[in-house]
Image (cartoon, grey):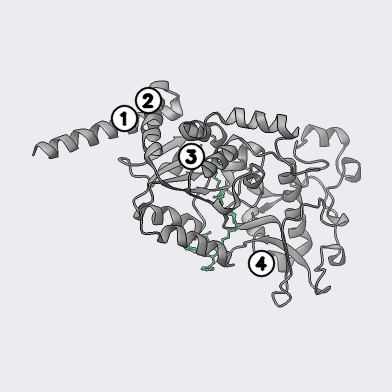
Amino acid sequence: MKILSRRASITLQHLKKHTSTRMASTVSDPNAKSAMLEDFHAHLLKSRRIVALLGAGLSASSGLPTFRGAGGLWRTHDATSLATPQAFAADPAFVWQFYSYRRHMALNAKPNAAHHALSQLAKTTTDFLALSQNVDGLSQRAHHPPSKLKLLHGNLFDLKCTDRKCGYKEPNNTTDPIVPALAIPQSGQDPTTTATEANAHANPLIRGLDISNPDHALPSIPTASLPHCPQCRKSLLRPGVVWFGESLPHDVLSDVDAFFSVDEPVDLMLVVGTSSAVYPAAGYTQIARAKGARIAVVNPDPGSGRALDEKKDWFFCGDAAEVLPEMLRPIVGDVGKIMDGMRVGDGNGDAARG
Ligand code: BJW
């Protein structure tokens, strides 16, 4: 009876603290916010096996659009409708223009403090694995150790032949544009837009016209001018990403399975910047939970904390680039200093562009 009432009071206290801090993270009550952070830090410091599921929101503050919600339209198309083998088969030029634009933007973007915090966590935690749905290369450019970064949905900069029998694959081709025909048009090249209009809507990551905006004319590109396979010299190349209906890379899946198959609990799972709408990626949270993990969600959308266990989990409502460095501070230290050091070290903070 004594134990029961003690338990009940701990649970009540925890729940009270948790509920108030959860509200506080949106109404910025500093006391409640720091209580939740303290509770999280205490668990982080005793966590041995940690896994992170990463999504497009991780790169949002680097300027890259997410898939769902605002920014998820490319011209008049839902970005996810272009991420299919069917869309590519129907109009390879249009789908290549979409991917060429995203390669260009990703190359001009910089990893943010959240990428650096995760990279540092990976370097300092032996049993850590990041399962990234992102294809933008920003975690790699934050020097995330490759063995601790599993790219569930491939990489924008990998290329592969559309003919599986040919099997040609080329990793990490950062040529921009990949072929001259896919160059981002410059403002003077669009008869429908004046230079002033183009500047008024300038996207800092685009050197030229923002062709995601349907007001700008899109050049028509003959199939012959699209990237072709240098091996079979016949078929088109395509981006090395995973489209809907396609299997995730087998080696990646087996590395992730190996992490979860270890006969030890998982202590903590970070779920950062994802709508958890796409499988099998989203399913890893349940797998981690079944292995004992407490879950910490980082997302500015209050709805994304819905499925959490009020007693065990945490919901940090906000921009990953602001929230995650604070969450991981007891292990990774001051991420701002690390980023400053990199800027001093190579003059750029990363090496995407020559
Ligand atoms: C911030 C922020 C800030 C904003 N800070 N946060 C089980 C049930 C039902 C269906 C299936 C199932 N298993 C498989 C399927 C089919 C399908 C699927 O999941 N369909 C769903 C729509 C239901 N899955 C597949 O087809 C997968 N393949 C597969 O399973 O093979 C076997 C199989 C095949 C067929 C049938 C059955 C089995 C392949 C999935 C491939 C997904 N590919 C894409 C495109 C990659 C290439 C590219 O980039 O173009 O991957 S789709 C797109 O969604 C992309 C993303 O990685 C993925 C996830 O999106 P993500 O990252 O979560 O982004 P958003 O935009 O959704 O969310 C962003 C979040 O950030 C939001 O919550 C914001 O609030 C937040 N945010 N600012 C922090 N500053």
Task: From the image, tell me which residue sits under label 3.
Answer: 298
Q: Where residue 275 sits in the image (x, y, percent)? A: 51, 48
Task: From the image, tell me which residue sits under label 2.
Answer: 32
| Callout 3–callout 2 Cβ contact below 8 Å | no
Q: Residue at x 78, y 35 (%)?
A: 202
Task: From the image, tell me which residue sits under label 1.
Answer: 17
Q: Amino acid at mark 3?
A: Val
Work out whether residue 339 or residue 215 is closer to the camera in this orientation and state it.
Answer: 339
In the image, residue 204 sits, relative to residue 52, either above or below, namely above
How would you rate the neighbour count of disc 4 (Cα within 10 Å): few for under 14, some for 14-19, many for 20 or more?
some
Query: Which of the image's four quarters has the N terminus?
Result: top left
Q: Earlier in the sequence, mark 3 or mark 1?
A: 1
Q: Residue at x 65, y 38 (%)?
A: 62
Q: In the shown orientation, is residue 182 left or right of residue 61?
A: right
Task: From the image, tell me which residue sits under label 4.
Answer: 85
Q: Residue at x 55, y 28 (%)?
A: 334
For this orientation, the residue located farthest to the left is: 1
| Callout 4–callout 3 Cβ contact below 8 Å | no
Q: Residue at x 28, y 31 (%)?
A: 16
In three-dimensional space, the C-alpha distance between marks 4 and 1, rounded to whole angstroms, equals 48 Å
